[in-house]
Amino acid sequence: MSTETTRTTPTFASRLVPSVVRQSHGLQRFMLLLGFVIIALFVLVAVFAPWIAPYGFNQDRADGVVFGAQQAPSAAHWLGTTVGGTDVLSRVVFGTRTAVEVIVLAVILSSVVGVPLGLLSGFIGGAFDRVLVLVMDALYAFPSLLLAIVVSIVLSGGSSGAVGGILSAAISITVIFIPQYFRVVRNATISVKVEPYVDAARVVGVRTPRILGRHIFSNVAQTLPVIATLNASEAILTLAGLGFLGFGIEPSAAAEWGYDLNKALPDATNGIWWTGLFPGLAIVLIVLGVTLVGESLNDILNPLLRTRSAETSHDVEELEEVVAEVEADAPATPAVSTRPRDPGGPPDDPGRRVAALSLTDLAVSFRTDAGPVEAVRGISFDVAPGEVVAVVGESGSGKSVSSRAVLGLLPTTASVSGSALLTRAQHGGDQHRDEEPRELIGMSNADLRPIRGDEVSMVFQEPSTALNPVYTVGWQIIEGLRAHDSSLTKKDARTRAVELLDLVGLPDPEHRVDYYPHQLSGGQKQRVVIAMAIACDPDVIIADEPTTALDVTVQAAILELLLSLRDRLGTAIVLITHNMGVVADVADRVMVMYRGSIVEQADVDALFSAPKHPYTRALLDAVPHLGREDGPGEVAGSADVVLQVQDLVVEFPGRLGQPPFRAVDDVSFQIRRGEVLGLVGESGSGKSTVGRTTVGLQQPTSGSVSVSGTTVSGLSDKELRPLRKRFGFVFQDPAASLNPRMSISGCIGEPLRTQTDQSEQQVEARVAELLESVELPAAFARRFPHELSGGQRQRVSLARALALDPDLLIADEPTSALDVSVQSRVLELFVELQQRLEFACLFISHDLAVVDSLANRVAVMQHGRLVEIGPREAVLGSPREEYTQRLIAAVPVPDPAEQRRRREARGSLLTDVD
Amino acid sequence: MSSAEILGPTDPPVAEPPRRRRGGPHSRLRSPLVRYLLVRLALVIPMLWILVTLVFVLMRVIGDPITAANGGRLTPAQIAERKAEAGLDRPLIQQYWEYVTGLLHGDFGTTLTDHRPISDILVVNGAATLELSIYALVVAFAVGVPLGRLAARYRDRWPDVVLRLFSILVYAAPVFFVGLLLKLAFTPFGWPSSGRASTTTELALEDVSPKTHIYLIDSILYGDPGYIWDVVQHAILPAVALGLLTGGVFLRLVRINLLQTLRMDYVTAARARGVSERRVVRKHAFRNALVPVVTVMGMQIAMLLAGAVLTETTFEWQGIGYELAQYLIKRDFLAVQGIVTLIALVVCLASFLIDVIVALVDPRVRF
């Protein structure tokens, strides 16, 4: 970025540039700085052109002596003279001035027009947006140089010569850049517009111009330096192109490189090299400088290309705090992590046990820009055939990294040490029993390849990204089969793929084998991923959070499938998860990981009944448990009704020619003062839409919503604004619901500043008070969201939601993005505040156990309809509806004995719901 | 010459639904290929209309074409007479109507200065531009795709650094400067550096057997190896100049998209099931990386045409761009209007074709 473009966005650039240099490394930084140096040089030349150039740009004689045309470089004319008899060096120097002037003007003009247009178009949407997009696309598709020529003729060559040469050239170039700014800003606006922090601002009644400025523009502006630099280089090339074709600046008005190149063109065939070479090199060099800066900025700012680890230290600190707290409560017994005693093992396991996979002192560290980060610090465990070993831990504990290290699937920035021995046992009878164990760590990619998928395979967390969208699922299964058995014919492989899909319970496998991943549901995709994992009868399956992305009923079915495969094929399974319920449900043995080490390993029953390490105890204490006896009861029927939802219907328009999609279908309920209504349902059940409609983020198609007796549905934004102080909203993802560019004080104070006339001191005082009530130090007010941990951020959103003392609080999955030990502390705080302030609360969650711990009443939604509503202990304890029964049966409870009983009891209730 | 070829792949998709539901069944909501293409085709029409109208308006803002072309040389009475003759004294809306209906019948108008039908320019000079564009695309692919893969493979190591510098240099050097350097370098060896063929070849191909107006095909049909060699020789320098420009863009696009897809889960998943590294790159990363590359290529067509104006002027290659520049200099705005409209048509059709290709590569669009 040149100093000129910096000037257009001073506050932003001054904040950005140093951080960009800090974020860059090695080569990137070199390219960035080189670019800056080149640009600075050109700017200096431009500014001091009259002093640097030996002659004037149109001067063809000095002291009455004519220079002469096409003179070769000499002492008097270092770069020779042109065909017009002027000094080449002087023309190049003055050309720099022209170029810099035009760039600066063009970049300023086009951003001044394009950015607001893009913001408005993206924000307002609708017909306005569609028409603008069409016009801009048409302009964009058109060859830009031709457009610039036409505009420059309109401006100067036509009837009027009102605009000066440089300005007219800049305007011609501007016209072709406006669509680019427009497109980028519009697209960024559209993606920022749906960010929770923009919703959060709308919920508290922030006016549109402020939302556009404070919340959207400040975040969209990140992309602008990149476009500005890239446009600057195009501006130079377009200017030169115009000059070359003879439509640029009048030759008498200023020196211009493109014009000079045109004049030099005939010279090229005559061996006169100096007239064209130098202006051309000037163009190349300045474009090079600007492009280097733009490219490195793009590279550095593109999150997809970063090599750094995303893990924040704040979350680690928070976990340490939790553990410290538990240790303080009960002094730690020495954490004995013994090698396994006799493992549970599968029932049909013969007395002698051969570990299929055995890890010893496995350690992984990553090279990052901030120095090496130790992700796994020497862990050891093994897994036997037919055994399920669960590796539990919270985010950043290193559980996924260790499993990927085994298969050599980590990026090149990782270094792995220790040992992972793979023993191929009991395969095809006894003859392989004594086969030598092989060391996987340090094995080359080529040697590992036959092992991957054939002997050790993986199941991934997110089935929608683990399948390649451009190939059919059958193709991908066949690919894996043929990678290990090249003699397999395509036809046989296909038959086998169909068999595998049938085996994992995908209905209608003969047809579905030809489906593309996006044609299957999430659970079906995970079945396909599992089919791939078992395709070659592996000895070990590493399942990395295989059910985390799935709904609870689908999760139960997938776990069922994994267990049945273990029983049928005798596979060893390493199950990586953070969900203690899943662990209790399926694991034989458990490894608890904490900050890269295994802090405890035990059989599943021992772990849950007598956890030894403080962290394990903290973790188990924190897990909400469905079916507690001591949950909250009903509130008195005499309390005021705060929220009344009546016959609510919300429809979303369908695609062209499709019927509208009914997200909420005839839902009615009410919440009284001091009451918490837990709204539960699986993804797509419409529960979030109910919450959004309640606070006016979504208009109902029919039906009504009233808060404290005032109807709020169907009101315009303006009419709704004074009512906004009656409700608060807590969003799912604390990282996304706080504007990254606003301080904590700004975030919490925004509702106060919008809704009240309090002075700045009063607001600050109230912010401090609110911070205290959510148990955060007052000094946090000056921090920015990224400096806080996940749990702290969610406390801040809670403080913001409570800033105006609302009658009603809507919490949409407030803790689902948090680790379980952090979640429990946030929930505790929430319950305490709710009891103290007595607000009514609609608590939306997919997690029945969480709802069970804090709701007075529970409502269950499915496919947009309210299935069941009633007191907590009735709905969750003895549900009447079959769907509720299924939902509850599917939830694994963190208690192996109880879960075993539940598993048997549920029997046929849980049929596949895919 | 557009920033979007770099920013393009990172732009959020325009029509992405705001919230992604976890694994919801959305397969039934997808429209089939035919519907997709019909919608795309329907979008071409308003786009074309906007461009045609824009060209018309801009050309009339300049002033009337007769005065522009002959100002100063004719008396006001003569100008008025000529305007009446060309129908330019009638109301603007009527002229616009006739212009648009004329276009619908395939009548692009006639040039003012040499009374040549624009459709004739399309046939003769259009073929020349098409020929040059194809050569340039061949060069661009040959340079951009393999080198982009190489750069991605050696990310942040020296081949990557060299190739990225190369791509920036190629982008930074205007096509007419590259042309000038090529001329400087090759004319001393007597290599032809202007025109589409030497005079004798041209006479033979244009007057004796004009068939496709694509010289390479015509000369092959004519069957004289001397002519073929002459045509090839003339084509190489302009094709390299224009092709390098586009090739640099391809290189960067392929590199960045390949790097992004190589980080996808499905690539790790493919490795985890034992697929060989070569196959992972070829089948999984490369094909997926091509989707955005193809999309941006649609925009490159416009860039190629703009570049062609400069390249054709540099090498006196008598294509549409060369003619356009000549008519612009002569201030023949009826000719300019016709040619620019023609280019708009080509751009719209190209963007539609690109949509078809994207649909063929990406099944998510198809179903």
Image: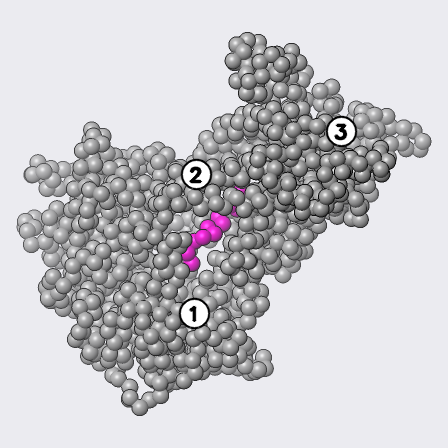
User: B160 or A679: nearer the eye?
Assistant: A679
The alpha-carbon separation of the residues under discs 1 and 3 comes to: 65 Å
Please name the residue that numbered disc 1 is placed on: A699
Q: Which colour scheme is used?
A: one colour
- Across and down, in percent, residue A127 comes to 52, 58
Q: Which residue does the image show at 34% across and 77% down from the upper left?
A: A646
**Residue corresponding to mark 3:** A263
Q: Which of A619 and B40 is in front in this view?
A: B40
Image mark 2: chain: B
Using the image, determine if residue B303 lies above or below residue A19. Answer: above
Instruction: Specify the amino acid type for callout 1.
Output: Gln
**Which range of residues does the magenta coloring cover?**
B1-18
For mark 2, give the secondary structure. Answer: helix
Q: Which residue is drawn at 40% across and 84% down?
A: A708
Q: Which of marks 1 and 3 is nearer the N terminus?
A: 3
Residue for point 34% across, 64% down: A662
Q: Residues within 10 Å of mark 3 (few under 14, many from 20)?
A: some
Which amino acid is tagged 2?
Answer: Val
Q: Can residue A172 be seen in this view?
A: no
Decide whether the magenta segment is chiefly helix, strand or loop.
Answer: loop
Which residue is denoted by mark 2 in the rendering? B356
**Nearer the viewer's eye, disc 1 or disc 3?**
1
Residue drawn at 81 percent across, 41 percent down: A253
> Depth check: A799 or A606 in front?
A799
Q: Residues within 10 Å of mark 1 (few under 14, many from 20)?
A: many
Residue A633 position (above or below residue B182): below
Q: In which quarter of the image is residue A552?
A: bottom left
